[in-house]
Amino acid sequence: MAEVKRVYKFGAGQTEGKAGMRNELGGKGANLAEMSLLGMPVPPGFTITTTTCNEYYTLGRDRVLSLLEADVRSAIAFIEGEMGAKFGDRENPLLVSVRSGARASMPGMMDTILNLGLNDEAVLGLAKRTGNPRFAWDSYRRFVQMYGDVVLGMKPESKEDIDPFEEIIEERKRAKGITSDTEFTAEDLQELVVRFKKAVKDRTGRDFPTEAMEQLWGAVLAVFGSWMNDRAKLYRRLNKIPEEWGTAVNVQAMVFGNMGDTSATGVAFTRDAATGERLFNGEFLVNAQGEDVVAGIRTPQPITIEGSRRWAKLKGVDEATRKKVAPSLQEVMPKVFEELDAIEHRLENHYHDMQDIEFTVQDGRLWMLQTRSGKRTGKAMVKMAMDMLAEGLIDEKTAVERVEPEKLDELLHPVFEKAALSKAKTIALGLPASPGAASGRIVFFAEQAEEWAEKGEKVILVRLETSPEDLRGMHAAQGILTARGGMTSHAAVVARGMGKCCVSGAAGIEVDYSKRELKVSGGLYKEGDWISLDGSTGKVYEGQIATSDAEMDADFAHLMELADKYAKLEVHTNADTPRDSKVARRFGATGIGLCRTEHMFFEGDRIKAMREMILAHDLKGRQAALAKLLPMQREDFEGIFEAMAGLPVTVRLLDPPLHEFLPKVESQIQEVAANSGVTVEALKARIEGLSEVNPMLGFRGCRLGIVYPEITEMQTRAIIEAALKLKKKGIEAKPEIMIPLTGILKEFQNQRAVVLRTAEEVFREYKDRVNFKVGTMIEIPRATLIADQIAQEADFFSFGTNDLTQMTFGFSRDDIGKFLPYYLEQGILKVDPFRSIDPEGVLELMKTGVTKGRGAKKSLTIGICGEHGGDPTSVGYCHELGMDYVSCSPFRVPIARLAAAQAAIR
Ligand code: PEP
Ligand code: MG
């Protein structure tokens, strides 16, 4: 049997991996290897594969440790050779970092340990060699703290609990009368280490490990363990990252950005991650470790002079202040900047994509710690793809593939209405961390954001800074406001990933968690007060501000043009009104795939006529009520047909159970009884008579039209008359009449006959004709199985995957809230089948439906109109099945167009 390779070295001519090995080495490991191969300055190290992480869960820790032992020891020896230092040595200790690195980037989700290899003796060696005892003790204190938290379980479970390490630090500060960590002396830090270790012993009953190899094994296992922590699980679920991927572990020689004023650490992007502009930008901190930049506790400085000037403009500060407060790396360390800028160009040209890089400067020497494709806003994603296409860096197909369909959502989102904005009062200014507009009530805690959002409240999560624990709350909020942190702070990075509006680092706001108050420019805002954020300008406003639809720019239009060039599927829309139809056309819909006629009955006085029809005692009474509804329906159809002139419009006949139109609460029952001229008792009896145990499996769909053919007659008449009226005006209408919930051939035959007969009647009356089609929803499992029979009589099929999913799983689509979240958490289901088509069951039925349908009638038009029609993965399945179109809500049309193109390209 071939030997399994679990450990890959990188650095200094000995690199064993490469960028293409992302699945095995994780993104970070693969790119560290690639940068080493490109001859860039990367501290030497090694990567333990993602497969080993899976082995940890299947074979157990002991077996995995013995499988790794020899290779890890030899890789450590390699690093020792490169660095001229020895792991665990008291004179010249080699220190390493241990970090996770999954296939897909999961910022801040898993754990990191720095300065591993220090103990009470090695720290003295480090102090002597660097001539900087304070630095050595600070490194040791950070190590004990991180190791204690991550490996030894010292981290408090919740934010309310006391963090033992933080408590010790605060105590020491109080005793010394100082306010900042930076004021600690070497002796203070030494004292902290002693007390930290005692806290570990008190809490865990174990001594802090002193032996370097023992420390290393603990850290490696902790990284494997962190793959299954709650944060990581949630992040994976939100980002659809499979659990089987596992994480790699990267062990790398430490380089120090905190060795004094010639050292620094930073993060940079080769293009602007918010706007997409080709501007090298980022942030760095002098005399700091990487975690300091990301944590957003100190406000970092920009990388380029241009960035620094923009910052100054945003903050309204003059050139002298700018130079003092936020001078750029370009100014502070010009040589390092030059080298970094050259690397940044090479990396973009090499990867053909925007890179997000991390670097450290140790004593004036630049080290690259990471490169990866940078996360970006939807807007930036589109702009970068189109710019790179124009620059010749990528071709058309790559440009189309570069944009995540879901991210287009951000471009389509509303912005503040200009008029409303001009009256709004600006109360603070922060950094424009993630674009979009958001209004909501202030909440200060993530849990509360979730609770309030569940009750239907719109909330803005306001925090000093965010951490991965706040993820759920950020997700639930409309927007996020933080007092601290830059553009690369946790809040900014995560919000951009979520496409959520975020303003970060809003200096001048004071957050008081205990009083649940926000103080700003003399004003006081309490929990529950409304504020608004503009994530594109960084402005914070008082109160609620009206929003208007987003405007699509030239890059977006260009992308859509390219998408249509490659897509095979057409994209139609689900729209019930002329207004929605117009919106959908603007987004590029080439037809209406589903017009749910029942929605029209809820408007204005129509509900009265509808109720009259339901309450009627006999056919005559029903016909009289339907006669009132006819002109209203006809007018609606005229509006829709006109908005969609020349494009197909699929109108579905009445679908929901009748009791949905009747009142539910006592006061309404009385009112309706009075208006309808029936007694309260009679009305109640009718409501009772129509009530069902399983309404979704009850008297609905074509069953209504079969029992009350006059409903189908009225609707057909309204559709055909509308088309004839438009024909007179010279406007072409292409109606397609759709029968809902067909499961038996005779059901379809029955309704089709009513439609055809009625249409002929209308044609005779009008002495004119129009072309129209009659087809059916395929949404009952049985319909997919007898699709060949139905196809012989139907002009088209439209898969109703909402009902098809409901009936295939036997899950009530209205009641899944009680168990689906649990199913997803437990991994019983990987994705919500109502969001993305279930590939094992529902998709199989669809396959059967398509094959049988087309087998019986080659020319059969087939589409989908369930919610899945706007889900990129499901659009991919529909492409595979050779369907003609997908239909989705207007705002998802561009997403589906792009997904259709990507499916055709792949
Ligand atoms: C469906 O079932 O997928 C569908 C589109 O119809 P509705 O959601 O109206 O039941
Ligand atoms: Mg349905």
Image (spheres, helix red, strand yellow):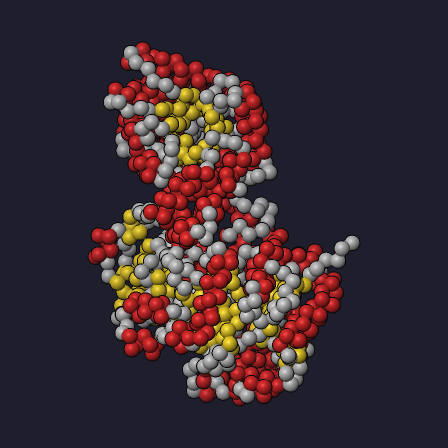
Image location of residue 294, percent across then percent down: 46, 68
Image location of residue 319, percent across then percent down: 28, 75
Please tell me which residue lies in front, 56 or 310.
Answer: 310
Asked if 465 appears above or below 790 in the picture, the reply is: below
Which picture quadrant has residue 641? Answer: top left
Which picture quadrant has residue 482? Answer: bottom left
Please tell me which residue lies in front, 576 or 850.
Answer: 850
- Give the total number of marks visible in the rendering: 0
Residue shown at 51% from the left, 63% from the top? 371
Asked if 670 appears above or below 62 in the picture, the reply is: above
* Residue 894 visible in the displayed image: no
Please tell me which residue lies in front, 620 or 761.
Answer: 761
* Residue 253 visible in the displayed image: yes
Asked if 894 appears above or below 335 in the picture, the reply is: above
* 726 left or right of 358 in image: left
Asked if 693 appears above or below 872 in the picture, the reply is: above
* 512 left or right of 522 in image: right
Image location of residue 687, percent across then percent down: 40, 30
Quadrant the N terminus occupies: bottom right
Which residue reaches farthest front?
392
Residue shown at 40% from the left, 50% from the top? 390
Image location of residue 729, percent across then percent down: 24, 22
Residue shown at 40% from the left, 48% from the top? 409
Residue shown at 52% from the left, 44% from the top? 832
